Image (tube, helix red, strand yellow):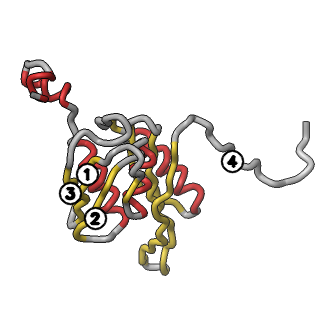
Amino acid sequence: MARENNKAPRRAEENDGLIKKTISINRVTKVVKGGRNMRFAAFVVVGDGAGKVGCAMGKSTEVPEAIDKATARAKKNMIPIAVLGTSIPHEVLGKFGRGAVLMMPASEGTGVIAGGPVRAVMEAAGITDIRTKSHGTNNPINCVKAAIEGLKSLRTAEQIAAIRGISANEING
């Protein structure tokens, strides 16, 4: 079967059930002897909407290629986070570089109260009720990494009880 046109096949969109959010696309240059090499750096957040989230950076000479690389790396970097219903179990402060993101649990129906990059992380992770506040830098990459660092450090009462070797009822009072 010969192809009638000489166009390259369109890239197939993966339907793996993951939520993919592109946070930023930056044009980066490398100055070399012959001039400047232009490339694109894409930063992507990937989550399953049920308590797993990851982020990664991908670089390439073309934007779609950079996004694909970042998405593949983010899938490998996915980490499980502790979720309590539709929110998080306790208040947490995530820090990365000069950025800090304070995340506070919210009652059901509150929604996601967060800035752009942090909102994408919460939606990808499947957290629907949370309040956040970014402190320090407003760099989207540092905000996302700070939010993920905070989510990494979350623990449920059952997890803490298992570590201490006691029942969850003793922790809750």
Residue 21, position as x, y percentages in the image? 50, 53
Residue 79, position as x, y percentages in the image? 33, 38
Which badge, 2 or 1, comes first in the chain's sequence?
1
Observer-nearest residue: 165 or 96? 165
Residue 30, position as x, y percentages in the image? 42, 73
Which badge, 4 or 2, comes first in the chain's sequence?
4
Camera-nearest label, 1 or 4 = 1
Q: Secondary structure at mark 1?
A: strand
For the point 57% across and 62% down, the residue is 63
Q: Quadrant of the C terminus?
A: top left
For the point 25% across and 39% down, the residue is 89
Residue 66 versus residue 87 in the image, above or below: below
Observer-nearest residue: 6 or 11? 11
Mark 4 crowd level (few <14, some 14–19, many ≥20, 10 Å Cα): few
Instruction: Estimate the spatial distance between the alpha carbons at disc 4 and disc 2, rounded to whole Å.
Output: 37 Å
Camera-nearest label, 2 or 1 = 1
The three-letter code of the residue at mark 2 reads Ser
The three-letter code of the residue at mark 4 reads Arg
Residue labelled with disc 1: 104
Q: Secondary structure at mark 3?
A: strand
Residue labelled with disc 4: 11
